[in-house]
Image: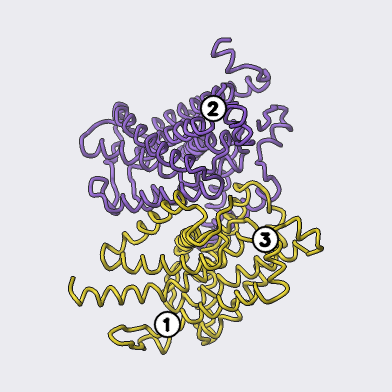
Chain colours: A yellow, B purple
Amino acid sequence: MTADFLLSLAQAVTKGLLTGMVYGLMALGLSVIFGVMRVVNFAHGEMMVVGMYLAWMGFEYLGLSPLLSLPVIAAIFFAAGYALQRGLISPFIGRPEHQQFLLLLAVAILLVNAALAIAGPDSRGVQLDSQFDSYELGPLVFDAVRLHAALAAVAIAGLLWLFFTRTRTGKSIRAAADNHMGALVVGLDVRRLYAFTFGVGAACVGAAGALMITIIPVTPFLAGEYTLLAFVIVIVGGLGSMTGALMGGLLIGVSEAVAGLVVQPSLKSMFSFGLLILILLLRPQGLFGKSSS
Amino acid sequence: MSFARRLVGHAAPRTLWSLVLLLALLLVAPAMLGKYWLSVLILILYFAYVGQAWNILMGFAGQLSLGHALYAGLGGYIAAGLFFHYGIGPWAGVFAAVAAAALAGTIVGYLGFRFSLAGVYFALLTIAFSEFTRIGFDHWEWAGGSAGLFLKVDASSDIANLRGGPLLFYYVILALAAGAFILCRALLESRLGRYWLAIREDAEAAQAVGVPVLRCKLIAIVISAALTALGGVWNAFYYNNLFPETAFAMGRSIEITLAPIIGGLGTLFGPIVGAVVLTGLGEAFTDLGEALGIPGIKQIFYGLALLVIVVYRPAGVWPRLADKLRLGERRR
């Protein structure tokens, strides 16, 4: 192994870690929703893509940098997620999985095709002024865009952690997740908390979309890939575990970047799915999940 | 009790006569239908058939698979590959195709059930295997890689190699769909079928009263995978092309699950009714979409229709319809 190879390996790992933080934020949304409501959001990648499109529109038509439109997008997603849970998903909680799957599949089809109808099938990207800037740390080079996105993702995850550990609503949501009946008994409005949770999960993925658009351009066809990617990440990290989703994101981000370097880039997701199979079989609660038994 | 008596069993005469009438109509249908309607009917029968196969695992044994494209894709690729490379016709190749899919089903099932994965976790395992295989086929020269595998289009009727026009494929898929229907009925009436229902309702209780749960689940996935592979072989020779991107895509797996879920999980008529509803809606929305000329509008209508059905008929269209028509098949 030459020094050159080691350097490009380190470079790939760095890149993977930065992208992985955005992946982690996306997966966090899925994990929060599942952890609290036991509903698997099969429309997650579609929501991500809608977030990317909104950020692109903000940039294209209003000249807003995605980092600035992010709070607005997160707020829109929160409201939409809240309404979606209240109006559509609520009666499906506790129903058989295939019914939830079909419901969210229908939502996914609607979202991605609405994006297709509005923005068309062409790939849409954002050209930031900082596009070609970079920071150097010793021999390593950090893309400015990627670094900003990763830092923003970490900041949002931190806010989410504060929300769940410090606020009354956040604590109530965790209580309802731990013990549904108990939460009802002490008088928590679980239906409202569930809607709030779906809103929070949606806001996460919307924010992740706004960050992702700065890294890669969006097409409607990315949606299915992101849904699968989010599944892989949360299963590897542990469904319902916040730390797990972030760590899973980093792991998958790095593995993709390294696989792209040492084997063919087109084989990169084979590695992710192989990892998913191993985790499902050997440690289904995920690397950071608590064992349920 | 003879096999035939058991099959007919306690089915109402009304139901039996309806079935006979339906089959007779389907047998003479090509004589009355134009090219377009025949192709629609072929599509309906295909989805009814693979839906029936998927329903064995999910509707009867209660295990949610979202990766059935794996078995259809494997079956199609193996039969088409044998024909393409060595000239081995599909009537022989189908045995290899079915064997490979059954083996894949055994592996997925054994790993999943042995480690007692259920619900969403099992579903994700099936997706993972299907995606894993998709990427593998993308890089497999023998199967044509990502550029795909093409069979020569040959309109001359060569039944020995399953080459011919739509009529040939119509009767083959009709035979498959009818055969699967009868097989499913026989399975449901058998001891194995009762075991499956017990597992579906409460696996722990079934285990406690001595049902060999692991073995029954494995049999379910193997039968389901083998039947799905037959559908895959048919599909490959009907369309004459195979791409990993579509053959093993998650969309293909989802497509297989829709007819039975929409029609009514665990019922025999559910997959058929679901296939009629979905294919009908799909065709209608295609026309509408072309008339409107907006990309994605077809799928938007399709998504709305799915949404309406799952919200208002979460148990599927058929159970309610059966009551109305007094054809009395309840989900068992």
Mark 2 and mark 1 on one chain? no
Circle 1 crowding by C-alpha within 10 Å: few under 14, some 14–19, many from 20 = many
Q: What chain does mark 3 sit on?
A: A
Q: Amino acid at mark 2?
A: Cys
Residue at image position (55%, 45%) is B118
Q: Amino acid at mark 3?
A: Ala
Does A14 sit left or right of A212 as displayed? left
Residue at image position (26%, 41%) is B152
Residue at image position (66%, 33%) is B331
Going from N to C along the chain, the mark reached first, 3 or 1, is 1
Residue B58: which numbered mark, if any?
none
**Residue at the disc numbered 1:** A147
**Residue at the disc numbered 2:** B184
Camera-nearest residue between A134 and A225: A134
Camera-nearest residue between B58 and B286: B58
Residue at image position (68%, 62%) is A85
Circle 3 crowding by C-alpha within 10 Å: few under 14, some 14–19, many from 20 = many
* Residue B13 image offset from top left, x and y in percent: 67, 18
Task: Check disc 1 and report its element: helix, strand or loop.
Answer: helix
Do we see residue B37 in this rendering? Answer: no
The answer to whether B240 is drawn above or below residue A211 in the figure is: above
* Residue B208 image offset from top left, x and y in percent: 61, 31
**Residue at the disc numbered 3:** A177
Mark 3 and mark 1 on one chain? yes
